[in-house]
Image: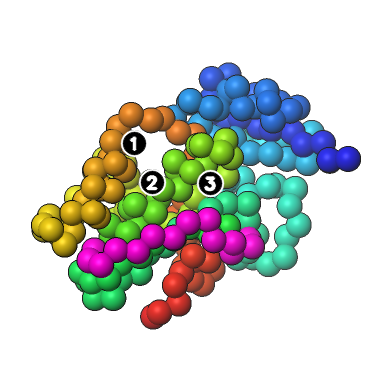
Amino acid sequence: MAKQKYYVVWKGKTPGVYHTWADCQKQVVGFEGAQYLSFENLGDAEVAFTKNPWLFLNKGNASAKKSSVSSDKIIPESLSVDAACSGNPGVMEYRGVHTRTKEEYFRLKFPLGTNNIGEFLAIVHGLALLKQKGVPNPIYTDSKTAMAWLKTKKCKTKLERNRQTEELFQLIDRAEKWLSENSYTTTVLKWDTESWGEIPADFGRK
């Protein structure tokens, strides 16, 4: 039998503490920038609701087992994305993996691109995937540039659009179109490489 969980919605249609995921989902789905988290203890959830959400969102489940100072801050049930480029521009690929298990969810490769484009597309790919599956997990990226592009909903690359890069630019067009036409509740978080090491989606080519 699944353990009872309680859901705190700090930012949503109606903030509060909810006893089922179904009730929580009604408050956050379709609400851009929603802030919410599950807890295993009702008392913890009620206390958390009265505090700054980022005290908990940066740590994951407040009732989770604490193993070390750095890992305590990582939300294990999340999606990590990253990109790699052989030269910049050069052969580019990006992927998304489960942060805890490192199970690969998607991976795409292009003959010519840049690392920033790959990071941006990986985030949008992750956002679309999580929304399609109805999964509330956050996304980690180690790219400040990609996060900035995400905020403006525009891939501000200087890469030339030509026959060699046309397939990549078609995907960029689709990503920008998706961002302009869709709302999402997924939180995109900056991976702290200095404290936590390489992001789980890293290609290990440094």
Q: CA distance from mark 3 to mark 2?
A: 12 Å
Mark 1 Cα within 10 Å, few/some/many (few <14, many 20+)?
A: some
Disc 2 to disc 1: CB gap under 8 Å = yes
What residue type is disc 3 on?
Pro
Residue where numbered disc 1 is placed: 178
Please state if 174 lies on the left or on the right of 79 as rendered.
left
Which numbered disc, 2 or 1, marks the residue that appears first in the sequence?
Answer: 2
What residue type is disc 2 on?
Val
Q: Is residue 136 magenta?
A: no
Looking at the figure, which quarter contains the N terminus?
A: top right
Q: Main secondary structure of the magenta part?
A: strand
Residue where numbered disc 2 is placed: 124
Disc 3 to disc 1: CB gap under 8 Å = no
Residue 74 position in % (x across, y down): 59, 57
Q: Can residue 204 be seen here?
A: yes
Up the image or down, 148 lies above or below 70; here it is above
Residue at image position (58%, 30%) is: 10
Task: Identify the element where label 1 is drawn.
Answer: helix
Please state if 164 lies on the left or on the right of 195 as rendered.
left
Task: Identify the element where label 3 is drawn.
Answer: loop
| Residue 57, quarter of the rendered image | top right
Residues rendered magenta in the picture: 99-114
Up the image or down, 41 lies above or below 169; here it is above
What residue type is disc 1 on?
Trp
Residue 53 position in % (x across, y down): 57, 39
Residue where numbered disc 3 is placed: 138
